[in-house]
Structure formats: structure tokens, C-alpha cells
Image: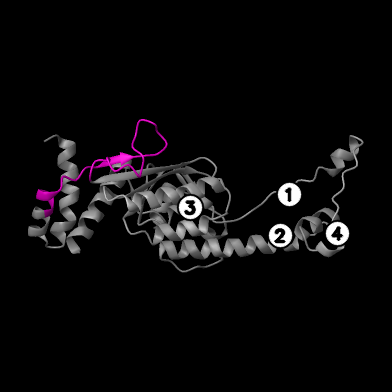
Amino acid sequence: MPEEQHARLFDVLLPALRAGAVTEAEQLLAQHSVQCYATTPYLAARWELDDTSIPDGSVAVITLEGPLYSWETFRLETFLRQAADNPRILGVVLWINGPGGMALYVDVVAKAISEYTKPIATFVAGYMLSAHFWIGTSAGRIFISSPLVEVGSVGTMTTYVSMKEYYKQLGLDVRDIYPDTADLKNKWFRDIEERDDDTILKAKLQQLHQAFAQAVAKNLSIDYDPQQPLFRGETFSGEEALTMGIVQQQGTLIDAVQWVVAQSTLKQIQQ
């Protein structure tokens, strides 16, 4: 047996041996050949998550890279459901390299990850910031590829841009017309535009920020302290995050896959 297969076999057996379930482990391995097979729906040459011909004992690797748009968050929920429903998939690794993005539906997907019926690990390839941090910390264990990765940015923001003065310079008269019966429609936008008052928008951002911070505190099993830099939008290197306990381990994607396999095996033995 190649050295790599020996290492994977050891990672599967170790949780069982620690639990004292030697006989059950032998029976399980005799009946099932566990494979550390990574699958991703982003590569045409790989398996789809609902494919029933995936090798038994596979681990789904779902990639989240670049800015997070709402359609990607909705699609992530679909991928997670497919992996959960496929009996050939043992669990999931979230491969993350992203700066965050749109907040829409992130709370729903993050909650689904924290309550997932199969083991989920996060592998931070580069950045795991803002919305990606919310999602990534919802997994059972977080691996970082390097001490130089960046994580954190627990905060909210939006950008307001007015083009009306520019249009005026071009000789264009641009007006937004509202009926008297819809006087509250887009009020936050109109307050900024007409009165330079961002009170409503800041209140909405603060509400979202508090929900974000409290969810992260729960994911990391720490108290929510609004004065801590972690909850005020600070970012941290991988080395700092390890020291703070924000992430659990430096390793490779294979390490994350093996952790999922080990957790799945232990769960089967304990049932």
C-alpha cells in the first residue's frame, strides 16, 4: 500500500481506537473501503454532487472564491443539500478564498452549515473575510493553508453614489418621482440624497452587524464583546488567528478531507 494510503487509513482508524471501538472499526473497514475522493461541481472533469456513481466514501470539496454574490450563496445551499442527500458522500470541505460580499441569505446558509448532518470542515486557501468568515466559521473545524492567510472582517458596510450633480453638468435633468401615498419608499436613500442624513441606513447596517457578530461568537464558542477588535471589523493573519483560537489548525486540503473522513467514521461507529 502506498505511503499516502497508509496515512489516510491511520486517520480513519485513530478516532475509532481512541473511542475503544476496535472490533467495530475492524468490521467497518472490512465492509467499506473508505476513499478520500474530493469532488467539486466547478470542474467539468469532476463528479457532480448528486451523481450516484461517485465512489463510495467520497468527500465533497465546494469552492468559494472571489466576491460572494447572492446567487452563489443560494447555489451553495443547493450543493450542501445534494451532498447531504447523496449516501456516497461522507461530508464536505468548504475551500474558501474570498473577501466577503453580499449579505443576503448568508445567515440562512451559515445556520444550515452549523446544523449539517454530515461533518463539514473549512479550508482557508487565502482570504476568509466578512461574509466568507461568517460561512467558514460555521463549520466544525477550520484549517488554514499558511500563517499568511487573512481572516476576520466581522463588519458591514455599503456604498452610496449620487450621479445627479454629474448629470446636471451634462445638462440632464434627472428626477425620481414618488406618489404621496408611498412617502416611505426608499426613505434611507432619499434622506441621504436630499438631507445628507444617513441615520436610517446606519441603523440597518448596525442591526446586520450585530447579528453577524453574535453568530460568529456562537460559531467560535466565545462571548460576544462589542469592544473586541474581532467584532469591530479587524482582520488577522493566520498566525494570529491560530493564537487567538479563531482557527484550529494549519494544514493542507488533504488534512481537511481526512478530518471529515475521520469524523464520519467515528460517527458511524458510535451509532
- Mark found first going from the N terminus, 3 or 1: 3
Three-letter code for the amino acid on which mark 2 is drawn: Leu
| Magenta region, main secondary structure | loop
Q: Residue at x 7, y 58 (%)?
A: 23
Instruction: For marks 4 and 2, give the CA distance.
Output: 22 Å
Q: Is residue 202 magenta?
A: no
Q: Relative to residue 239, is residue 71 drawn left or right?
A: right
Q: Relative to residue 210, is residue 260 drawn left or right?
A: left
- Numbered mark located on residue 201 in the image: 2
Three-letter code for the amino acid on which mark 3 is drawn: Phe
Instruction: For marks 4 and 3, give the CA distance.
Output: 42 Å
Instruction: For marks 3 and 2, give the CA distance.
Output: 23 Å
Instruction: For marks 2 and 1, give the CA distance.
Output: 10 Å
Q: Which residue is mark 1?
A: 160
Q: Relative to residue 15, is residue 204 drawn left or right?
A: right
Three-letter code for the amino acid on which mark 1 is drawn: Tyr
Q: Is residue 204 above or below residue 158?
A: below
How is the rendered protein coloured?
Answer: one colour
Secondary structure type for disc 2:
helix
Q: Which residues are magenta?
A: 28-56
Local crowd size for mark 2, using a 10 Å CA cut-off: few (<14), some (14–19), many (≥20): some
